[in-house]
Amino acid sequence: MAPRGIGFRVGIAAFTCVLLLVSPRGQSGTPQPDAAVEAMVSQVSTDRLVETTTALAGIPTRFSPTSGCATAGAAIYSFLSRLGIAVEYESFRYNSARVPVATAGRNVVASLPGTAVPERVLVLGAHYDSFSNNQFKVAPGADDNASGVAALLEIARILSRRRFALTIRFVAFDAEELGTFGSEHAAGLAKRRLETIAAMLNLDMIGYSAGGNRTLAIVHDRNSRPIARLFVQAASRYRAGVETVERMNVKWARSSDHASFWAAGYPALSIIENNPDNNPHYHHTSDTPDTLDFAFLTAVTRATLAAAATLAGGEQAPTDDRTASLRDRPRPECPRASR
Ligand SMILES: [Zn+2]
């Protein structure tokens, strides 16, 4: 019997309720777990993550200029619409050395309006286009980046049933693999509109664990260090089941969509497996769902949901910097195209 509820293709209308997030602090100063956030974290479904990752990777290619990418964008649009939140395409044009002609791209953007400070926006993002050694025909991109989109949609499914102090914007970016064009468009638009982006969390390559090493890198720049601290604390506080390591602006994590937000002056994090260069299927036709560790993807989704709910609830990122940069040692650069 087929599973019921919202699949990647089958949805139900979301119900809404007001969520008041409070975070009483323990004697150590560390906020205590919030029961509502705990309940949301417990709703993360491995089956749904498998379903969405498999559906996206089942499209022969999501290389941005192909019809497969448009199919993926439409499926993401449809999924978010069924959650009962406002969704739109943001279209843009770009020129890339990898494509012979000027090309159109489109981000899929859904918004959950904030209740207390709607002008402050938390952006959760993941690119949905893919790349490979045969990108016009076969580019399943399961780890890169069906995994990130699956997490994004699972978090949207759960968070959209509630309301938060801040506005939450879910963005599936196009044309990341050709030069982060989708996120450049989105970050530039936010800047021109003088928007306040409280934080941007970028999910890109979060499903592969080399040799069962389930360590997640939280990559930040100087401006984003407090957000990284909050993420790590939230992952621990809500027992997400993933080990996190903070890294300061490492070169192997620069070429993805968070960097567009850094460039626009906004705090942003790269949420990424540590180290993605360990994935031998990266940018190859062999990047398929059977190579992924879905328990790891589930844990990363839980951690990101916990951090997002905490940030969107209005909790301030910690300012205590005493433990900063203990883990910030740069890794050797691996020159690569965009993740
Ligand atoms: Zn990527």
Image (cartoon, rainbow, N blue to C red):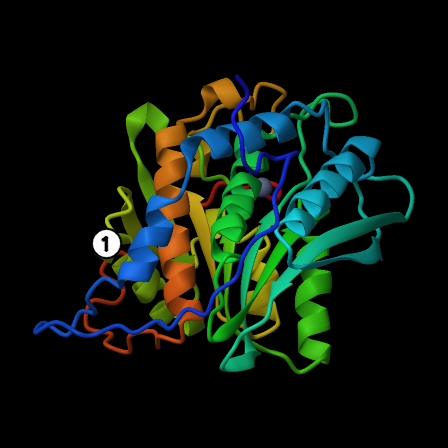
Q: Position of residue 61 (x, y in %)?
A: 73, 27
- Residue nearest the viewer, comparing 217 with 328: 217
Question: Which residue is located at x 65 percent, y 49 percent?
Answer: 80
Name, please, the residue furthest toward the right.
Answer: 101
Q: Position of residue 316 (x, y in %)?
A: 35, 77
Q: Is residue 253 above or below residue 32?
A: above
Question: Which residue is located at x 17 percent, y 69 percent?
Answer: 30
Q: Position of residue 212 (x, y in %)?
A: 30, 26
Query: Ligand 1 lies in which image quarter?
Result: top right
Residue 203 is at least partly visible in this image: no
Residue 150 shown left or right of residue 10 in the figure: left
Residue 178 shown left or right of residue 265 in the figure: right
- Residue nearest the viewer, comparing 301 with 185: 301
Q: Which residue is mark 1?
A: 236
User: How many neighbours does mark 1 have within 10 angstroms: few (below 14), some (14-19), or many (20 or more)?
Assistant: some
Q: Amino acid at mark 1?
A: Ser
The answer to which quarter of the image holds residue 120 is bottom right
Q: Is residue 24 above or below residue 148?
A: below
SS label for mark 1: helix
- Residue nearest the viewer, comparing 239 with 112: 112
Residue 224 is at least partly visible in this image: yes
Residue 208 shown left or right of residue 153 in the figure: left
Q: Considering the image in quadrants, where does the C terminus appear? A: top right
The answer to which quarter of the image holds residue 52 is top right
Question: Which residue is located at x 64 percent, y 31 percent?
Answer: 56
Question: Which residue is located at x 66 percent, y 67 percent?
Answer: 187
